[in-house]
Image: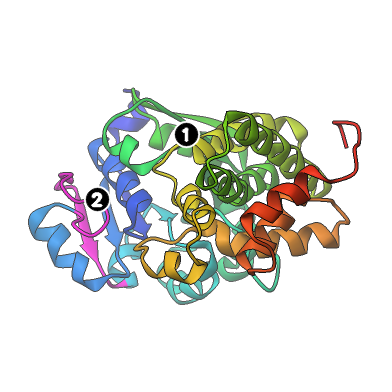
Amino acid sequence: MNEQHLKAKTIAILGAGTMGTALAQLLASNGHSVQLWAYETELVDVINTQHENTLFLPGMTLSKNIVATSAFSDALSNAEYALSVTPSQVIRTLWGKAQKYLGPHVPVICASKGIETNSGKLISQVLEEVIGENASERLAYLSGPSFAKEIMDGQPTAVVVASTNEQLAADIQQLVSTQLFRAYTTNDVVGVEIGGAIKNVIAIAVGIAEGLHLGINSKSALITRGLAEITRLAVACGAERETLAGLAGMGDLVLTCTGHLSRNLQVGIRLGKGETLQEILGSMKMVAEGVATAHSTLALAKRFEIEMPVTEIVVDILNEQITPTDAVMALMGRKLRPEKE
């Protein structure tokens, strides 16, 4: 462990779901003091007294360096770093209330993955609007193939930290890295965000294929063509193509489309088996980001005149405009073309 790791920091984490809790445990185990803000007020006493997130990660012991709170002021007032690990669609509202408690130069690390509905804005654009002064210099984004439970289990994990402030990215790389959690850096914020957001949409499509009992041929095709359309949109938005071949692109896509811990994959599986979206979402404790992101992705693609047939089919299935079985035939019946298109 290097010298910077040995210097303990006070870190606020907004969001006590699976990933927020896993990152809290990672940082606390690295010697940092973590103030974990929980939307679910019933969790605060449980985490502080039982040292366990009984709602989202039951049976997994948490460090005593983690203190839970339901007050933004308690979480943020003394923070040297702040992590945002909430559903993407509540970020504008949440940080609109929370940012006044944050010091004017405190970095904010966002681990949320999505595209804002209605506006079609990336989370970086939303945060720059609500954080205010010097926002882009203070903002970084954590992404890559990382299931929360496996982080908690100490499974070797590699992620990427993106920021236009390269020194900030390097500082956060040192802050989060351990012997079993390795962070890389990039300045391609747009590529990291789009890769992290749209992989959830493609995972719904792959899940639908699994729910229909389609084979590896079909799922491999969806993952590969999904990556192609993610890359097309990302490049149109100003991203570097290479980013989508890395951890935040291909890496996170493979994880989310093949790992059964993926909520978005599970939504797709259940859709493929014939359940309605309302039934599925009503039974879930955590948010499946791909449901909202599918609609905002398609709107963004139309703005840039980018074809995204897999995303379009997912939106049609979510809107009950086509059945999963008919969707397969619609994709297979598209006009033949070169692979690069």
Q: Which residue is mark 1?
A: 173
Q: Quadrant of residue 239?
A: top right
Name which of mark 2 and mark 1 comes first in the sequence.
2
Q: Which residue is mark 2?
A: 57
Q: Secondary structure at mark 2?
A: loop
What residue is shown at x 18% (from left), y 47% (from top)? 65
Examine the structure image and report whether residue 309 is included in the region drawn in magenta: no
From which residue to which does the magenta span run? Answer: 53-71
- 312 relative to 267 in the view: left or right: right
Q: Quadrant of residue 229?
A: top right
Q: Amino acid at mark 2?
A: Leu
Please name whichever residue, 166 or 341, is drawn nearer the observer in this view of the structure. Answer: 341
Q: Around disc 2, counting alpha carbons within 10 Å, would you say few (fewer than 14), some (14 to 19), or many (20 or more)?
A: some
- 155 relative to 166 in the view: left or right: left
* Quarter occupied by the C terminus: top right
Q: Around disc 1, counting alpha carbons within 10 Å, would you say few (fewer than 14), some (14 to 19), or many (20 or more)?
A: many
- Does any portion of residue 130 appear in the rendered image? yes
Q: Quadrant of residue 301?
A: bottom right
